[in-house]
Amino acid sequence: MNPPTPPPTNPPPANLPPPGTRPSNPAPSSVREFEAVARERLDPVHYDYFAGGAGDEVTLRANESAFGRLALLPRVLRGAEKPELGVTLLGDAPGGSASMPVLVAPTAFHRLADPEGERATARAAAATETIMMVSMASTVAVEDVAAAAPGARLWFQLYVQPDMAFTETLVRRAEAAGCAALVVTVDSPVFGTRGRDERNGFHDLPDGLCCENMRDGDRIRPIVLSPAISWDHIARLTELTSLPIVLKGVLHPADARTALDHGVSALIVSNHGGRQLDTVPATVDVLPEIVTAVGGAAPVLLDGGVRRGTDVLKALALGAAAVAVGRPVVWGLGADGERGAVRVLELLRAEVEEALALCGLASVHDLEPGMVRRLRRSW
């Protein structure tokens, strides 16, 4: 008789699925997988609001595909056991640094994605020690966003209103809430027409929700976009507040130079996520020109199309000080609320760290233009 077979020394845990099978509901492991889950859970009209762009959505698609035409050229034997990811963007100003070069871009209406809305986003930003740019069109007032996440690093996004007295009121509220900078969006003299919203008839928030920062006594003011807003208004803002001014929506090198002349502290190369003027270039395509125009006089950030840690490295190699992500955080909120937003930001952090190690670098500050190659077409 053969002796009994001894039990395995390391039996598999009882809670693992049988070999060759997959978990029935695997957790999302990329930004795109989070978007797929969010799309299933969100009202289709609200998903289209977040996902859509202006016109034929040419720029919306270009923002992502442009990263696919860039290849990373790694170095070797120059890394560190623990790569350095932290960035300082506004000098010694409080709230001007982040633990990684991925910030939360200003996006509106977070309570369409999760009942906690911008409160959850702020807690996610605080948990990951990064900066959240609170939208003027937030569905939670900036004071309440700050209260929900004590110690969070907040910047306030502002559309300068023709009524400068009310603009000053908004600035004072941002200051009182502890915001460390004003992110002034300048690419929106009018609202860009977004086909998905037109087809869905989505022109206002559902009952019970509003742009809380526009509350003025017993009424909610509309956000007024005006082509009359000019460089003079930027000059007046710099006189109005001691907060650093970050200009968002710059695509032309001449505008970048003019911004410096007006005392702007940083620039964000942005086409509004493809939601304003369609057929403008992808942000990463114009980034090098803006960086050259600025000449190191101020940090240059980028948003639009960032979906992977490798995208972050490409932008940094081409001169960006950091990137900001909008839709990815919304997909996290839509998929799993605050936990989902934290997971998206942590995924991007892990991807940045891995890509940096694979590029043979010890710090995000070691990236340089020679590490990027332009391809004829996307992968």
Image: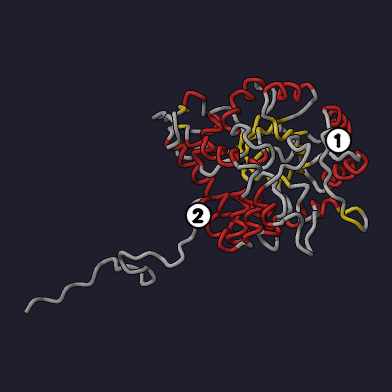
* Residue 333 in the image, given as x and y percentages of width and height: 62, 57
Give the vertical position of 109 relative to 58 (above or below): below
In depth, the one of 66 and 233 nearer the eye is: 66
Report helix, strand or loop for mark 1. loop
Amino acid type indicated by mark 2: Glu
Q: Quadrant of the N terminus?
A: bottom left
- Looking at the rendered image, the disc whose residue lies closer to the viewer, 1 or 2, is 2
Amino acid type indicated by mark 1: Thr
Q: Which residue is mark 2?
A: 33
- Left or right of 350, for residue 171: right
- Left or right of 16, for residue 142: right
Going 68% across and 47% down the picture, which residue do you hit?
A: 194
* Residue 160 in the image, given as x and y percentages of width and height: 83, 38
Q: Which residue is mark 1?
A: 241
Colour basis = secondary structure
Q: Quadrant of the C terminus?
A: top left
In depth, the one of 319 and 234 nearer the eye is: 234
Going 46% across and 65% down the picture, which residue do you hit?
A: 25
Give the vertical position of 129 relative to 139 (above or below): above
* Residue 260 in the image, given as x and y percentages of width and height: 75, 23
